Image (tube, rainbow, N blue to C red):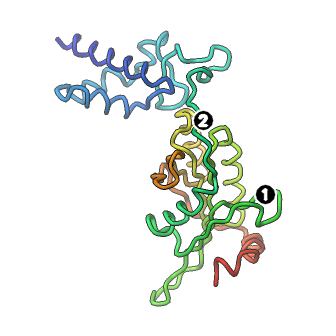
Amino acid sequence: MSKNVTEKIKDKAFELLKDNPDGLRYSELVKFISENDEKLNRNTINGSIWNLDSQFPEKVYKPSRGLFRLVEFKDPETDELRKEVQPKEAKKIKEEDFYEPFSNWLQNDIEDVTHSIPLGGNRFKDKWGTPDVIGKKESKRSDIIQAPVEIVSAEIKTETNQLITAFGQACAYKLFSHKCYLVIPKQSSQDEVARLDSLCQVFGIGLVLFNVENPNTPDFTIRVRPNKHEPDFFYTNKYMSKIEKELFQ
């Protein structure tokens, strides 16, 4: 009986991976299998699929940590997802459409800043780039302890083929910001998201996923929280002087 249940679980796992060429994370597999049959014991599910790639190396592989994908969807030359099953680019929506929604979310939903503004373009006028959204966090006048002002910057990307460039830009903003966010489409490849998740943890950058198909309800979700650090105040003052009227008055 136990063997039949185990086989049933594995068959369902293969079925789910077949329906999701980009792959599924371990926790997602467990969740979907459990929802499909509530009678199944969660520990039994865990024990049946945690090493699915080791049990069936000819069928399943891990393109990144914790992500299962069927071998049939792997490009034999690059080990990446085959082009014909890669997530399709979302319909073209202007990146700028998400600047104000993220600015509002940063200020009103997670309250990581007390004031923020959409920026973008080439406002800083140098090759290091300009954040798409920038904000400040400062103490209220009524606060007994007055904390130093913090600068928070964000790089937003709607095109999934520009994620590496976006990460590099977010890293550059650490030069003058106390916290930085990288904001990318949740429609991005699972493998790319997993890699950026790890990189953001290493570099202390916040990672936020959003629905790139609808600027009205982007559904911003934190994947990795940013670490606060001390920037180089020479550059902080240099760049803040360019937007002083908008951000500080």
Residue neighbourhood size for the residue with mark 2, other residues' Cα within 10 Å, grouped as few (<14), some (14–19), many (≥20): few
Is 75 drawn above or below residue 149 in the view shown? above
Is 158 drawn above or below residue 140 in the view shown? above
Say which residue appears at 63% left-offset and 13% top-offset.
76
Counting from the top left corner in percent of width and height, residue 145 is at 48, 85
Q: Amino acid at mark 1?
A: Trp
Residue at disc 2, secondary structure: loop
Counting from the top left corner in percent of width and height, residue 233 is at 72, 73
Quadrant into which the N terminus falls: top left
Counting from the top left corner in percent of width and height, residue 100 is at 57, 63
Q: Earlier in the sequence, mark 1 or mark 2?
A: 2
Determine the CA span between mark 1 and mark 2: 27 Å
Q: Is residue 156 left or right of residue 8?
A: right
Badge number at residue 166:
none
Is 154 drawn above or below residue 167 in the view shown? below
Q: Amino acid at mark 2?
A: Glu
Say which residue appears at 58% left-offset and 79% top-offset.
148
Residue named by callout 1: 128
Is 237 drawn above or below residue 10 in the view shown? below
Q: Is residue 28 left or right of residue 91?
A: left
Residue at disc 1, secondary structure: loop
Residue named by callout 2: 89
Residue neighbourhood size for the residue with mark 1, other residues' Cα within 10 Å, grouped as few (<14), some (14–19), many (≥20): few
Q: Which is in the foreground here, disc 1 or disc 2?
A: 2
Counting from the top left corner in percent of width and height, residue 66 is at 46, 31
Say which residue appears at 38% left-offset and 22% top-offset.
16
Say which residue appears at 55% left-offset and 34% top-offset.
189
